[in-house]
Structure formats: C-alpha cells, structure tokens
Amino acid sequence: MGDAMGVDFVVIVDNLAEKTQKEVHEFFGGYGKDSEFSEWEIFTFKGKTYAKWNFPKRYFSPAEDPVEWERLRKYLVEVRRFFGNGNVYLTNDLLWSWSELSDENPWSDLPLRLDEIYLEEPDYQQYPHLKDV
C-alpha cells in the first residue's frame, strides 16, 4: 500500500480461471529481493477466489488524467483476461480497507464492481501510443 500521505487504488479481480499463486507470480512477477512479494495475491472470500493487486497505482482522477486512465484500463483488460474475464472491483484505500474483508464480518464486502464499459480496450485512435504499451 501507499505511504500515510497518499491514496492508492484498490483493485480486486474474480479469479474464474482458478489461477494458483505460483502461476500468478510467474506471469506478473513481483518486487523485492528475488521478487519475494507477488504483484497479485490470490485469496478466498465467501467461498469464491479473487486476486488483489498488491502494488496498485496511486489514485488519480480519470477525468483529470485521461491518458493515465487509458493506460490503467488497458492493464485491467489484460489482467481480467488472465483471470478468466470475471468482474473487476475498484475503489481507493481512503474509502475501503483491505483489513475489513473477513468472512466472519457480516458487513464486509468487496469494493464496487467496475462497469463493463470501463473494461473495454482503450481507443487506440485517440491514444495510439498505448497500442505498444
């Protein structure tokens, strides 16, 4: 997560393809010495399997930085495809706390589901430089 002064996105994806943590780490890699920290973490919540992005981008307003939003959207399209084309849940860590996600807590739930329109490939005519990113 980000430092105390920053706000990060919280991104969780349905793991419909039932990827293992090893497969995920091999595909996305990680950080730290010998990439000891996986980029994505597999977890189970209320009987379903999900993946959480451990090193998300700092929060930004898509309206204020449309190019960065399109870059993020392209990444989420690829991530979603890898995990079996399920739902993507998106918020920021100011509004949602990972620590509150618990099967025992009846109020615990995933962040808001991102609408399908935001999970389409970017407009490459408007953002041609993203085609090769």
Image: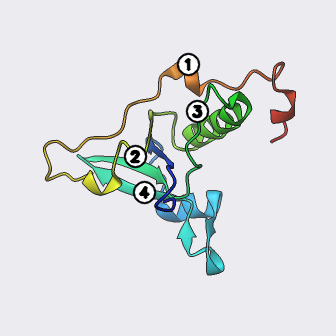
Question: Any mark on residue 42, and which?
Answer: 4
Q: Is residue 50 above or below residue 54?
A: above
Which amino acid does the dot numbered 1 rest on? Ile
Which dot, 4 or 3, sits closer to the camera? 3
Question: Any mark on residue 117, and which?
Answer: 1
Task: Determine the secondary structure under disc 3.
Answer: loop
**Quarter of the C terminus within the rendering:** top right
Q: Residue at x 86, y 33 (%)?
A: 129
Q: Marks 3/2: CA distance?
A: 14 Å
Q: Marks 2/1: CA distance?
A: 24 Å
Q: Residue at x 64, y 79 (%)?
A: 34
Which amino acid does the dot numbered 2 rest on? Leu
Disc 4 + disc 2, Cβ < 8 Å: no
Task: Determine the secondary structure under disc 2.
Answer: loop
Q: According to the image, what is the colour scheme of the structure? A: rainbow
Which amino acid does the dot numbered 3 rest on? Ser
Which amino acid does the dot numbered 4 rest on? Ile
Which dot, 1 or 4, sits closer to the camera? 1
Q: Earlier in the sequence, mark 4 or mark 2?
A: 4
Q: Marks 1/3: CA distance?
A: 17 Å
Q: Marks 1/4: CA distance?
A: 25 Å
Q: Residue at x 63, y 33 (%)?
A: 73
